[in-house]
Structure formats: structure tokens, C-alpha cells
Amino acid sequence: LKYFTTVNNFEMPPYIRLDFGCSLKFNQDKRCHHTLNVGIYNVLNRHNPFSLTYDTEERTWKKVSIFPIMPSLNWTIEF
């Protein structure tokens, strides 16, 4: 069992993520403006560590990963 002498004295494994996004702006008239945002989070689909938990039975650290590749869509209307 590893022993850490102070709080937050642990270094997480390396982390890499690539996000991609594109915005399209268009106007219906002078009073209404539309913006459409399309994106992809974690294009590389890496299972980056979100947190670590310690398994006392196996005496090892387990990596907890969330959010594989994920699309996003956002439509904004301004008056």
C-alpha cells in the first residue's frame, strides 16, 4: 500500500484530448440572429483518467474513465 505524506500528493497519469468544433452564423432578418455550433469532444477516443480508485483486495489503483468520443450540437437564437 502506497503512503502519501500530504493531501493531494499524487500525480495523475498523462492525459490527452482533441476537440473539434465549427460555428455557422446566419440571420433571418435584422432582429433575429442564429448561430449553430457543431462539435466533437475527444476525437481521438482516448479513455483518459477522470479519477483513480484504490482496490484494497488487489492492492492496485484503478483508472475511472468517462466520456468517450461524444458529439455536441448547440443552436443559439438572439433577438
Image (cartoon, grey):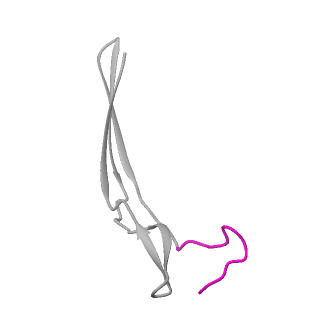
- Closest to the observer, 3 or 15: 3
Report which quarter residue 2 is drawn in. Answer: bottom right
- Closest to the observer, 41 or 27: 41
Is residue 16 on the magenta stretch?
no
Q: Is residue 38 above or below residue 25?
A: below
- Residue, far left: 28
Q: Is residue 29 left or right of residue 6?
A: left
Q: Is residue 65 left or right of residue 72?
A: right
For the record, the magenta segment spans 1-13
Number of numbered callouts drawn: 0
Which corner quadrant holds the C terminus?
A: top left
Q: Main secondary structure of the magenta part?
A: loop
Q: Position of residue 55 (x, y in %)?
A: 47, 80
Report which quarter residue 6 is drawn in. Answer: bottom right
Is residue 9 on the magenta stretch?
yes
Q: Position of residue 19 (x, y in %)?
A: 40, 54
Q: Is residue 48 above or below residue 31?
A: below
Report which quarter residue 37 is drawn in. Answer: top left
Residue at figure coordinates x 34%, y 65% from the top left: 45
Q: Position of residue 18 (x, y in %)?
A: 41, 59
Q: Is residue 55 above or below residue 30?
A: below
Residue at figure coordinates x 46%, y 86% from the top left: 57
Residue at figure coordinates x 50%, y 87% from the top left: 59
- Closest to the observer, 42 or 7: 7
Q: Position of residue 29 (x, y in %)?
A: 29, 13
Residue at figure coordinates x 34%, y 11% from the top left: 30
- Closest to the observer, 4 or 72: 4
Which corner quadrant holds the N terminus?
A: bottom right
- Residue, far right: 5
